[in-house]
């Protein structure tokens, strides 16, 4: 009985089986053995607390009961009470070094669990010196040695010593005796959707809303999503209007697990639809995540042609609303192992994911990748200890503030198995701080909402960063990386486009900005200010940042071949009136010349400079002068 108990919690199942015994199991007090057997029965049923009580009674009866110390260490290891586990191992080693030498590997693993990687490396090196280790034990030791060496080096290269990792259980409103995992939050961090394994069997989605600092009592998600089948691994879009998730063994499935889509309606979430080919295949697709603008879908699949077991892919949404052919994200992210659980932050520049193929602490670790200016993903980085541990890590999401993270864990204060926790990210592995803009696009005459495309351009680079489609009511939400100035463009056929720039580079993060956009129907005398046409002081050469705006005018003219327009140039009142008139005329002409160079018929174009004669604001302030320095487009005929 003693021998089978000693094996129960020994991680090193393949260690050398021969050792000289100074410790004699036949001389252990019989009463201690009885307590020990009771402890084993409790432990095998998962009742670890009672098991520890019986182990302690066995050791009170016979303190030199080495197998009891080893089993106690194993139980504490299962409970992730690493300090108690380590102390128990060390007591066993002190009692009989020879009998316990094969346990230096689980001892090392628990040292690593406590973050003592240098000690863990010493212990595993000692383990590797044991003569006649079998091949399985040698491989296990070598694997752990590489992990501990990585951990020691990571500590030297990163400022982790002062990082306080203090995950907080989100509480009884969300967590229960069932398993809760795979959290997903909206951009405002006020809606949390997660998976719950109800009664240990069926996976369903639950939702909780934040009111102040408190989460409401979680309830099953509204609508027709939850079923008798397993729904899991979900992602709610940043605006809270789409939900993508994994459905396994559904009747309409193409493979074992497929990706499904649902949208939020006035009656709740719509009946899920299989996303279909080419995203779904006869193989396994899971853990989907939408980019903040909902134009890209990231997911994991074990389809043929990848780098290993499971790879991360991305599919782009086409103009017809369908998803395009998925593209493998490449060898810098995907490995011969498994990669899964991609999460794209609100900045649309940072991705977190899990991998057991990239170098880490053991099992599945969490990593980040950052998007480069050319659209590729690079700078892959392990998130480090204590976010990553010797255990398998699961999905991670980070709120728009860049520092608040959510994940599932079975820590000591769990309500039952996996619970959802929140913690603060270490600074060097945070995504970009992100602000967001919401509003409504509407007809300026009727005030009715207009479904439209809203496009944001980085004024500095001219690069289109975000292009989102409003919902049917014209509502939109856009997330923006901090530190840039943006041009907002809105296009809809039959309307003058909207164009305005916003100097968000100086705005505070983690705030909501509301920009409602009224579009003017195309009709005679309708006009719009071209806010993103730029000239240097007292010059009329178009700056490069103006090109994106000018191309919108070209598009407007091509979409409406019957209209003629007037380009009007305006200045503030600084300087001589005659000089301002000439400057404004030359600036208007520069715009027309560009349009002609893009094959717009000159007969459709007129230009005129008005100097400072038509101010729209008070020239007594710098802000007023800036508003008066403008280029306007007016419809002359339709």
Image (cartoon, rainbow, N blue to C red):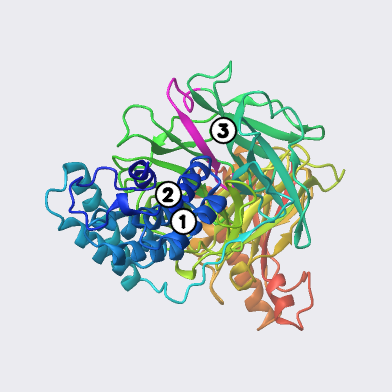
Residue occupying image coordinates x 66% and y 26%: 272
* Residue 306: in magenta span: no
Q: Secondary structure at mark 2?
A: helix
For residue 33, which numbered disc appears in the image?
Answer: 2
Could you classify mark 1 by the number of other residues whose Cα lies within 10 Å: few (under 14), some (14-19), or many (20 or more)? many
Residue 157 appears in which quarter of the rendering?
Answer: bottom left
Number of residue marks: 3
Q: Quadrant of the C terminus?
A: top right
Q: CA distance from mark 2 to mark 3?
A: 72 Å
Are the residues tagged 2 and 1 within 8 Å (C-beta)? yes
Q: Secondary structure at mark 3?
A: loop
Q: Look at mark 3 in the image and give the residue it sits on.
A: 319
Q: Kindly report the secondary structure that dominates the magenta region of the rendered protein.
A: loop
Horizontally, residue 189 falls left or right of residue 46, namely right
Q: Is residue 408 visible?
A: no
Location of residue 16 in the rendering, given as x and y in whole percent from the top left corner: 19, 47
Are the residues tagged 1 and 3 within 8 Å (C-beta)? no
Q: Look at mark 1 in the image and give the residue it sits on.
A: 58
For residue 464, which numbered disc appears in the image?
Answer: none
As drawn, the residue found furthest toward the left would be 131
Ranked by sequence position, the earlier of labels 2 and 3 is 2
Q: Please determine whether, in this image, residue 266 is positioned above or below residue 620.
A: above
Could you classify mark 3 by the number of other residues whose Cα lies within 10 Å: few (under 14), some (14-19), or many (20 or more)? few
Q: In the image, which is nearer the foreground, mark 1 or mark 3?
A: 1
As drawn, the residue found furthest toward the top would be 251
């Amino acid at each position: 009985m003693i021998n089978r108990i000693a094996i129960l919690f020994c991680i090193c199942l393949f260690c050398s089986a021969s050792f000289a015994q100074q410790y004699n199991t036949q001389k252990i007090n019989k009463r201690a053995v009885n307590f020990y057997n009771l402890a084993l029965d409790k432990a095998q049923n998962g009742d670890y607390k009672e098991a520890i009580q019986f182990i302690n009674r066995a050791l009170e009866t016979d303190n030199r009961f080495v197998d009891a110390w080893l089993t106690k260490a194993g139980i504490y290891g299962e409970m992730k009470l690493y300090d108690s586990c380590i102390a128990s191992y060390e007591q066993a080693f002190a009692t009989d070094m020879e009998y316990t030498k094969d346990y230096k590997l689980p001892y090392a693993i628990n040292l690593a669990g406590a973050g003592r990687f240098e000690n863990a490396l010493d212990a595993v090196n000692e383990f590797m010196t044991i003569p006649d280790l079998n091949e399985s034990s040698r491989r296990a030791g070598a694997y752990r040695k590489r992990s501990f060496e990585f951990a020691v080096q990571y500590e030297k290269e990163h400022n982790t010593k002062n990082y306080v990792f203090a995950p907080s259980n989100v509480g009884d409103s969300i967590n229960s005796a069932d398993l809760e995992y795979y959290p997903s939050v909206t951009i405002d961090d006020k809606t949390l959707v997660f998976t719950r394994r109800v009664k240990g069997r069926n996976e369903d989605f639950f939702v909780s809303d934040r009111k102040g600092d408190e989460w409401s009592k979680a309830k099953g998600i509204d609508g027709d999503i939850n079923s008798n089948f397993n729904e899991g691994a979900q992602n709610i879009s940043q605006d809270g209007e789409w939900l993508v998730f994994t459905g396994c063994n559904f009747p309409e499935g193409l493979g074992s697990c497929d990706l499904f889509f649902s949208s939020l309606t006035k009656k709740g979430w719509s009946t899920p639809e299989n996303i279909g080919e080419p995203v779904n295949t006869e193989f396994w697709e899971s853990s989907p995540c939408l980019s903040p603008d909902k134009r890209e879908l990231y997911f994991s699949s074990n389809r043929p042609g990848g780098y290993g077991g499971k790879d991360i892919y991305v599919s782009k949404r086409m103009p017809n609303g369908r998803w395009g052919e998925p593209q493998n994200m490449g060898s810098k992210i995907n490995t011969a192992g498994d990669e899964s659980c991609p999460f794209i932050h609100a900045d649309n520049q940072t991705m977190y994911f899990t991998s057991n193929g990239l170098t880490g602490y053991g099992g599945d670790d969490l990593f980040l990748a950052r998007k480069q200016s050319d659209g590729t993903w690079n700078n892959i980085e392990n998130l480090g200890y204590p976010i990553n541990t010797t255990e398998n890590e699961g999905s991670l999401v980070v709120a728009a503030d860049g520092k608040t993270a959510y994940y599932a864990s079975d820590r000591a204060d769990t309500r039952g198995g996996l619970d959802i926790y929140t913690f603060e990210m270490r600074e060097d592995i945070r995504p970009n701080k992100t602000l967001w803009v919401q509003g409504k696009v509407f007809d300026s005459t009727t005030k009715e909402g207009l479904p439209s495309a809203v496009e944001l351009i980085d004024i500095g680079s001219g690069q289109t960063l975000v292009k989102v489609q409003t919902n049917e009511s014209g509502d939109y939400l856009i997330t923006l990386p901090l530190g840039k100035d943006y041009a907002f463009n809105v296009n809809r056929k039959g309307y003058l486009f909207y164009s305005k720039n916003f100097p968000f580079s100086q705005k505070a993060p983690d705030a909501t900005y509301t920009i409602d956009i009224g579009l003017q129907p195309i009709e005679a005398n309708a006009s719009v200010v071209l806010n993103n046409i730029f000239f240097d002081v007292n010059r009329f050469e178009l700056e490069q940042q103006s090109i994106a705006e000018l191309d919108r005018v070209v598009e407007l003219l091509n979409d409406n071949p019957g209209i003629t327009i007037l380009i009007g140039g305006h200045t503030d009142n600084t300087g001589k009136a005659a000089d301002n008139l000439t400057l404004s005329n030359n600036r208007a002409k520069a715009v027309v010349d560009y349009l002609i160079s893009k094959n717009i018929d000159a007969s459709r174009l007129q230009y005129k400079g008005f100097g400072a004669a038509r101010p729209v604001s008070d020239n007594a302030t710098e802000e007023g002068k800036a508003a008066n320095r403008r280029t306007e487009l007016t419809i002359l005929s339709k």
